[in-house]
Image (spheres, rainbow, N blue to C red):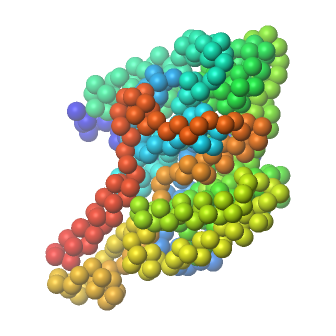
Amino acid sequence: MPTARHVSPDDIRKGFSKAMSDMYRDEVPLYGALMELVAETNARVLNTDAALAHQLQRTGEIQRLDMERHGAIRLGTAEELATISRLFAVMGMQPVGYYDLTPAGVPVHSTAFRAVHESALQTSPFRVFTSLLRLELIENPELRAFAESALAKRSIFTPRALELIQQAEADGGLDATHAEAFIQQALETFRWHHTATVTAAQYQQLSDQHRLIADVVAFKGPHINHLTPRTLDIDQVQAAMPGKGITPKAVIEGPPRRQCPILLRQTSFKALDEAIAFTDAKGSHSARFGEIEQRGVALTPKGRALYDQLLNAARDELGAFPNEANAGRYTELMEQHFQRFPDNHREMREQELAYFRYFVTEKGLAAQDKAATLDELIAAGHVDVEPLVYEDFLPVSAAGIFQSNLGDAAQSHYAANSNQAEFEKALGRQTIDELKLYGETQQRSIDECKRALLA
Ligand code: OOG
Ligand code: NI
């Protein structure tokens, strides 16, 4: 049973997110440079865009902006995935969504661990995109057997972390001292290792099969491979990156620039090669990179279908994977096709393309018009409507991010191979449908308005 002695899982997550960010900044200096650039840009945008500042104030996002970030890890076995799920649960993070990356030539499937309730997200929106390697997609049987045995030998959690997870499960939480110890122990799983567990030749073989396979199999643990801050204007940050010595990938993933941002736009930069000691020789490995993202409104199933349709149409017309050479043309095509997606909140709401949150205004509280419908309350200025921010990821974008940091040479061909049941079997539980979560948050805000107006 959770008791008063217990630290809230949301506060543990907040502490962990901060500890992770500090560790990553120490290890990857460019991440610090990117954080500064994002903070400067966000301050400028808030200063010049009063409407946006007001919106973020109202939804509370302004308070979480500076601590907003996501990370990513890649796991090797079902057991690792099941245990990481328990580790994240101690911090109030649950697996949301299922992403199949095989159509993009990346042999993994993934979920995002995150908080699920708007009040928990308000305390800390930290999320981790978590992928599981699909060894069954390695064709060479000897290499597959070698990968399996290398993974079977490693333990990615410290013994103390495992004890603390068990304690949290048995007692329903952790007190302050144990929560602090848990954060320090959990951090070890995500740390970079300068030594590999395989020989240089074995690494090369794994890497020849797929760079990602080497990244997972050749190391002691699933090092965090990026940590992504949230910006309010991704185009401004993208344009300013070269001035800070950072070279971004050619195209921003996700929807084109709009008045009313939808879903998620992301861009990344490639990490440098890092020196690695193999068991028999020195060498290098590149895995860690930087990324930024801009979040917009969450879309309903209807809105998402329209997004997917327009994205596919633009990509089909481009006829190639977006890259440096066709970046201009791709941006043009995206802008053209997305003309069909209404770019104001009123139409998006009327056509039920996006999720919103509703807030009673001062005027509404004074008027206490109990008989009016929601639409009438909005029209009368008694209730304000704000976009509900998208908290998740996008499979096509994620594929673009994977590919840009693995290098184009890493593009393999796998038949589309979605297998959510297998993933959930490994995870030991079902993933949560993100659309259900958005629907619930929207409904809670409507109920809240009704309560306030019936008071
Ligand atoms: C994850 C890539 C996907 C995102 O933000 O979509 C991702 C990885 O490279 O492990 O981070
Ligand atoms: Ni990412």
**Side (left or right) of 347 relative to 254:** left
Q: Is residue 85 left or right of residue 314?
A: left
- Tell me where residue 206 appears, x and y as whole percent: 71, 22
Residue 63 horizontal/vertical position (percent): 48, 61
For residue 142, say whether it is visible. Answer: yes
Q: Closer to the camera, 264 or 242?
A: 264
Q: How many marks?
A: 0
Q: Where 320 falls versus 5 (above or below)?
A: below
x 72%, y 52%: residue: 321
Q: Quadrant of ligand 1?
A: top right
Closer-to-camera residue (418/405)? 418
- The answer to whether any part of residue 20 appears in the image is no
Q: Quadrant of residue 40?
A: bottom right
Name the one closer to the observer, 344 or 335.
335
Q: Would residue 306 be found to the left or right of residue 33 on screen?
A: left
Task: List x then y, in percent, for residue 336.
Answer: 66, 73
Which of the two residues, 169 or 264, is positioned nearer the viewer here?
A: 264
Residue under the point 49% across and 52% down:
392
Quarter of the N terminus within the rendering: top left
Whether residue 208 is situated above or below residue 336 in the rendered picture: above
**Quick one: quadrant of the C terminus?**
bottom left
Q: Residue at x 51, y 19 (%)?
A: 158
Q: As drawn, is 37 to the left or to the right of 350?
A: right
- The residue sitting at 69% across, 36% down in the picture is 412
